[in-house]
């Protein structure tokens, strides 16, 4: 079993979720505050010490047509810094519409009071991790 930690990168808040390859499911963790996209690296170090991830995944913000936007390069830089600081493999996962889906899920399970920014960001990170895991796991072959 392998643990994956995923991030929904933002300049003020970075959503975080942890997932397992064996179940291809994830759970949201507390979002990290950021200043111009820079998190408290010591908090990330503590997070990694607790969860012992073997893989990291960073949501890649793209325009609806698949082209890059200004935040795309910043998310890539964040992923590269994660790899450089911690030596863990980092994958980038298309995150189009994850925040919209996160808001819909949270609203359905608690109304407007659940739409706090940090909760939305971590729910988006959960979707990013699960999307990554669903693409990562080998598909079963049902043929004989």
Image (spheres, rainbow, N blue to C red):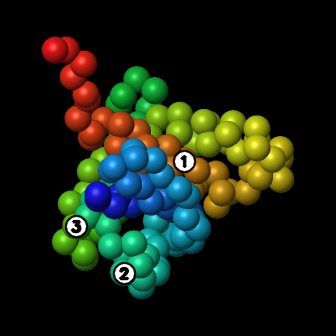
- Judging by the rendered image, the residue that carries numbered circle 1 is 124
Q: Distance between the residues labelled 3 and 1?
A: 22 Å
42 left or right, relative to 104: left
Residue 111's x, y, as percent? 83, 44
Q: Which residue is drawn at 36% across and 81% down?
A: 49
Q: Residue at x 81, y 47 (%)?
A: 110
Classify 10 Å Cα crowding around label 3: few (below 14), some (14-19), many (20 and above).
some
Query: Is any atom of residue 11 visible in this view?
Result: no
Upstream in the sequence, badge 2 or badge 3? 2
- Judging by the rendered image, the residue that carries numbered circle 3 is 88
Q: Residue at x 35, y 43 (%)?
A: 133
Q: Are marks 1 and 2 in contact (CB under 8 Å)?
A: no
12 left or right, relative to 108: left
Residue 131's x, y, as percent? 40, 39
Q: Distance between the residues labelled 2 and 3?
A: 13 Å
Nearest the eye: 105 or 59: 105
Q: Do the residues labelled 2 and 3 touch (CB within 8 Å)?
A: no
| Front label number (2 vs 3) | 2
Nearest the eye: 135 or 103: 135
Classify 10 Å Cα crowding around label 1: few (below 14), some (14-19), many (20 and above).
many
Disc 2 element: helix
- Judging by the rendered image, the residue that carries numbered circle 2 is 49
Residue 47 vertical placement versus 90 (above, below): below
| Front label number (1 vs 2) | 2
Q: Which residue is drawn at 29% across and 59% down?
A: 2
Disc 1 element: helix
Residue 138 vertical placement versus 115 (above, below): above
Number of numbered labels in the structure image:
3
Query: Is any atom of residue 29 visible in this view?
Result: yes
Dividing the image into 4 quarters, which one contains the N terminus? bottom left
């Amino acid at each position: 079993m392998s643990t994956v930690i995923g991030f929904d990168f933002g300049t003020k808040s970075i959503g975080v979720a942890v997932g397992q390859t064996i179940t291809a499911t994830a759970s949201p963790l507390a979002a990290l505050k950021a200043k111009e996209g820079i998190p408290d690296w010591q908090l990330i170090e503590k997070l990694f010490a607790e969860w012992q991830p073997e893989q990291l995944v960073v949501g890649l913000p793209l325009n609806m047509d698949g082209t890059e936007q200004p935040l795309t390069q910043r998310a890539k830089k964040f992923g590269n810094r994660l790899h450089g600081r911690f030596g863990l493999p980092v994958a980038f996962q298309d995150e189009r519409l994850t925040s919209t889906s996160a808001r819909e899920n949270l609203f359905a399970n608690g109304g407007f009071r659940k739409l706090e920014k940090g909760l939305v960001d971590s729910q988006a990170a959960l979707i990013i991790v699960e999307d990554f895991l669903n693409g990562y796991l080998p598909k079963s072959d049902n043929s004989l």
